[in-house]
Amino acid sequence: MQLPVTMKAMVLEEPKQSLVFKTVPLPVPLPQQVLIKVIACGVCRTDLHIIDGELTQPKLPLIPGHEIVGIVALTGNSVMNLKEGDLVGVPWLGYTCGTCKYCLNEQENLCDNAGFTGYTIDGGYAEYTVTNEKYCFQLSAMYGNASGAPLLCAGLIGYRSYSMINKNAINIGIYGFGASAHILIQVAISQGKKIFAFTRDGDKDAQKFALKLGAVWAGNSSQLPPEKLDAAIIFAPVGSLVPKALQAVDKGGIVVCGGIHMSDIPSFPYHILWEERTICSVANLTRNDGKAFLKIAPEIPVTTEINTYHLSKANEAINDLRNGNIHGAAVLVMS
Ligand SMILES: [Zn+2]
Ligand SMILES: [Zn+2]
């Protein structure tokens, strides 16, 4: 592959500022890394939290983006399992140490020394990116385009959140019907679950979208569902939804918080937690989550609803996501 010496990228120079469209040097892969020609990169809510300064440890300047679909363009000297031309996906988890107590206990998502794509490692809002070969996934050919990008975080985190739920749960509530929800509902329905979708109050478009995808009920987050839930997953970064969801789940039920950042959770009476209800959060992903999800996604097959923007329009995509103007997922494309 003929490689340029520079590339276009959207760069975060300081938090709370717009990204800057720039020409930067082409990154050079280290021995264990591959250089990837980016086809598409999803815009995730986590990117908003980074840009807004709510996640406080980004490398700067930073190329955001951790839902990357691309083609291997060059391999480092010690790369074993990938070759030029391979179709790969790059997720949020970009590095783990392999030696901390979490890594040794199959909890690499909690690694003390982890690196994160598009946060502590440059990501995919660019024409090229480099990544350690051990942290990218081979993708089914059907996802070798913009439609595959949302699987890499929205899909994966949704799947990990869903994995926290008892396998026998049937009635599942989803609070916040965006990128993660629209993927997860397809997985859950394929496994016989009934989905109750909760949106911002009055967001009829999102409710219609959820019903179109097979939700048995869609309504406002302030409402109680018509049936008790066995479990609820909260994707919206809104802490006041936690007591709402607890009131909606039945005895023994679980409320899973799927986001990396959430506004404060208001205090609530103990009786809505009693009867062995549980609240938990989900952090990051393990590579095994990725392998499991990316195996079943093409079998179902999961499809995604995307709004595409050219790389140079990333700030527009971010604003649309922030303002709730996107149903499904926003994805940047490079050409
Ligand atoms: Zn570790
Ligand atoms: Zn994400």
Image: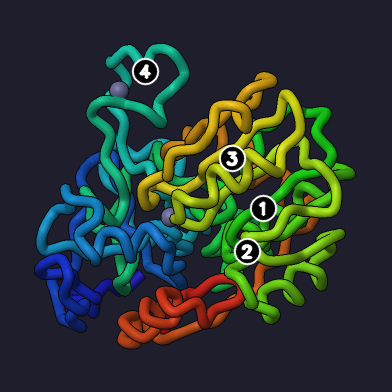
Alpha-carbon span between mark 1 and mark 2: 7 Å
Alpha-carbon span between mark 4 and mark 3: 19 Å
Q: Position of residue 66 (x, y in %)?
A: 38, 57
Q: Residues within 10 Å of mark 2 (few under 14, many from 20)?
A: many
Residue displayed at 84% across by 39% down = 170
Provide the residue designation for mark 4: 102
Provide the residue designation for mark 2: 177
Provide the residue designation for mark 3: 161
Q: Nearer the viewer, residue 185 or 116?
A: 185
The numbered dot on residue 217 is: none
Helix, strand or loop for disc 3? helix
Helix, strand or loop for disc 2? loop
Regarding residue 253, the answer to whether it shows in the image is yes
Residue type at mark 3 is Ser
Which callout, 3 or 2, points to the residue nearer the camera? 2
Among numbered discs 4 and 2, the one appearing first in the sequence: 4
Which callout, 4 or 1, points to the residue nearer the camera? 1
Residue type at mark 1 is Ile
Res. 17 image quadrant: bottom left
Alpha-carbon span between mark 3 and mark 1: 11 Å
